[in-house]
Image (cartoon, coloured by chain):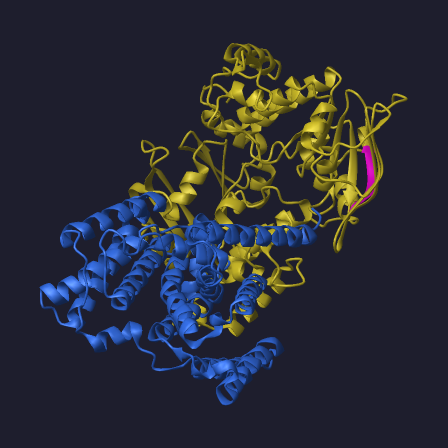
Amino acid sequence: MNKTLGILGLLVLACVATALINPQFVSAYNLQNVIRWTSLFGILSIGVAFVIITGGIDLSIGSVVGLVGCLLPLLMVEHGFSPAAAIGAVLGLSVAIGLFHGLLITKLGLQPFVVTLCGLLFYRGYARFVTGDQTQGFGTGFETLRGLATGKPTTVATSIAVLAAGALLLEVLRGRREQEGPRRGPLLAAGAVFLAALATGVFDPGGLAQVRAPAPFLIMIVIALAAGLFLNATVGGRYLYAIGRNLTAARYSGIDTDRIVIGAYVACSALAGLGGVLFALDVNSVQPAMHGNFYELYAIAAAVLGGCSLRGGEGTVTGVVIGAAVMRVLYNSINLLEIPTQLEFSIIGAVILLGVAADELVRRTVARRRRGGS
Amino acid sequence: MSSRALLEVRGVSKSFPGVRALERVDLHLDEGEILAVIGENGAGKSTLMRILAGIESRDDGVVAIDGEVVAPESPREAAGLGIALIHQELNLADNLDAGANVFLGREPRRFGLVDRGAIRAGARSVLERVGADFSPDAPVADLSVGRRQQVEIAKALSCDARILIMDEPTSSLSRAESERLFTLVRALRGRGVGVVYITHRLGEVTELADRVVVLRDGRNAGELRGDEIGHDAMVRLMVGRDLTVSDTRSAAGPGSVRLKVEALATEHSPQSPLSFEVRSGEVVGIAGLIGAGRTEVLETLFGLRPRLSGVVSVDGVALDTRGPRQAIDAGLALVPEDRKRDGLFAEMSVRENVTITGLTALSRAGLLDRRGERRLARDLVERIRVRTTDIEQPVATLSGGNQQKTVLLRWLAVRPRVLLLDDPTRGVDVATRHEIYSMIEELARSGAAVLFASSDLEEVLRLSDRILVMHEGDLAGVLGRAEASEEAVMRLATGARGGAVG
């Protein structure tokens, strides 16, 4: 929780600083872009968070994004697949890839790093091979389908208001079920967010009410809610954390560790595949050699920034999504503040390092304070 | 007593937020003395030793060596002062050989490169001094726990340690290895080394110590010397009262056969299939030296190791031993030997640790019933008085004894028909040990079949209705209550049919 608040603070700081220096940041156009990219990367990050919580890693995400991005237009344009069939096929392939990774890691006992590194190389190479390295796209057709990535069905203010209202309601229900009444912190936070979103919608300060919610944002919200529900409220979620904390103890406790770990890799690749579909629909011009390069690293960085530990057993969906947002805001501010784009990687790297180092220092101080006698 | 003590500790205090770990503790150690420091878990022994070894700093008080005040701030400084701490969990690099470990961090060099010849020669002589029967080239990974300990002691001696602190050195040694260690410790005493010996095994204290210092709740609780050193006197000082050792075994006598094992062949000893049975309400102990295959039997039954052949049945139904999940479904439970490695989720809460086995029963449509989970955790914790105020506390912050109880609780939640325990009280203090015994006996009374392995003979004799003695993978013999004695067990465990005592 503290970790999530810390990263939220970093996000707010980055937003405010950028907005003060260049008011362009809060223009509807720019915000919509930042939110769309955050959502696309957020989907990948949530996926990799599952794997990281088990103590594993997935380096193949960017190549899966690339492969899916190549195959989807290829199937639809060249082979005449219907959109539904094509999407079904590539998502099925993504699930199969995750299953393959999971089986190699659990049943054969290979290291996740090695398995997914080979995946990174293999899927990229295969994507370039099947396309003959030719740029793929949907042309001018498939407008409805592309709306999945480019549409803006509602406003951000409305969707946040709905979310906050939902959270408020859930907290009240939870309080009643547990017979202890709703907790004040979450209640106040959700209430404040709800009122803020409502006020934004009504008074339209600085045109913020005009900011539309990109479709990927709504898709990511649904995925985040499902992932959060799984991690916090189901037996499987508890097992996932337990496996990350101590794999052998989990096995000794009778947990089917293989199944859970395989599930995590499947979820990761499936979300990479879904992200790949949306990325492809969004850019409409997929270069087999480039599309999705480094995306696994962005996803892992966002997850770590958001509180996942590569040692496993730690991480929250909220943190990971905020982590993805920080990455995108940083990237955006580099452009807006006219910092040379060559420095992009350096700046993002430095900020992540600072964030992680600060977090570790805080953790140690707390641990020192807590460590009792014996 | 010499006029100037080798080591003198005066009024040392140490607090952690919320806990007063040590309060004005005094202690002195002479040259050529074996001083036992005993006390329940949480009494402050480990904290005191960590201060002496430079791992922890003290808030107050004085530590003096040869009358000179010292304040080691790192293990390296402590070593420079002649203090060596041998940890409960041995700290060796098991990918290196024995010699390399003896000189780890202080490698002699020639032309800037590690001088292997000097290491081998130096290590050989110091290993000889500790009575090692293996060469400096032996990979540590291949050495038994007892031999690894010899490497640790050799390492300490090669640094010219004059004060040797040993934290529960026999907790994973076989009887014979322990005897060898005692001989070595006495020899070191003869050479003027001062030994601080921490243990929970009071029998060893009687056997070895010249003097005993008892700590209780971070303070000096008393001191015994010479003839005063006796089991009851020590227990009285440790717990501050007399412990009534109840011997309340199932009066009703064992019931029907719960666990039946026929010609079970394990990976450890495929050539010697084992057959035995455990009845409902019966407590059966497996005795034997380290490496005799005790752990392997338990882990094979629990599906953690492959069963090569043989039939295992629970209440007459053949058991599927493909994995722990199947074993648990059939009513088995296992409390593993190494609770840190195989049992605990250290950073997770007591609640999450005790409910992990019962979560599926606590969920509806895949969703956790959090209130039910908290209620279960609270019920369990109250049942056996884990000393924690808060079920949300991370298990890592509990004492060893309470951690062990946490692992046991996990299984009470699912009411096992067959309870398997591997060294159930390793590193657990006397009072908690008795509580664990009562828990085991209570489970047996309620109809469970209990099968446990232990390297602590006292424990095997105290708990078991019957004792299976193993020797190198074989079932060397079965002893009933009447014929069980330390001698009888050891005779079988060492393969008395004529083999060497090992």
Q: Name the side, left or right, on which B53 lies relative to B406.
A: right
Q: Observer-nearest residue: B462 or B42?
A: B42
Hue of chain A? blue
Tell me where residue A265 sits by quadrant: bottom left
x and y percentages locating residue A145 in the rendered image: 22, 75
The count of marks equals 0
Residue lying at the far bottom in this picture: please name it. Answer: A202
Up/down of A50 relative to B52, above or below: below
Q: Quadrant of the N terminus of chain B?
A: top right
Q: Is residue B249 something one can see in this rendering?
A: no
Residue at image location 14% in from the left, 67% down from the top = A76
Q: Name the side, left or right, on which B1 lies relative to B328.
A: right
x and y percentages locating residue A349 in the rendered image: 48, 50
Residue at image location 37% in from the left, 44% down from the top = B300
Hue of chain B? yellow
Residue at image location 71% in from the left, 33% down from the top = B53
Q: Which residues are magenta?
A: B218-224
Residue lying at the far left in this picture: please name it. Answer: A79
Residue at image location 58% in from the left, 62% down from the top = A6
Up/down of A315 relative to B135, above or below: below
Residue lying at the far right in this picture: please name it. Answer: B3
Q: Is residue B295 something one can see in this rendering?
A: yes
x and y percentages locating residue A319 in the rendered image: 49, 64
Q: Observer-nearest residue: B276 or A236?
A: A236
x and y percentages locating residue A195 in the rendered image: 55, 85
Specify whether residue A45 is painted magenta.
no
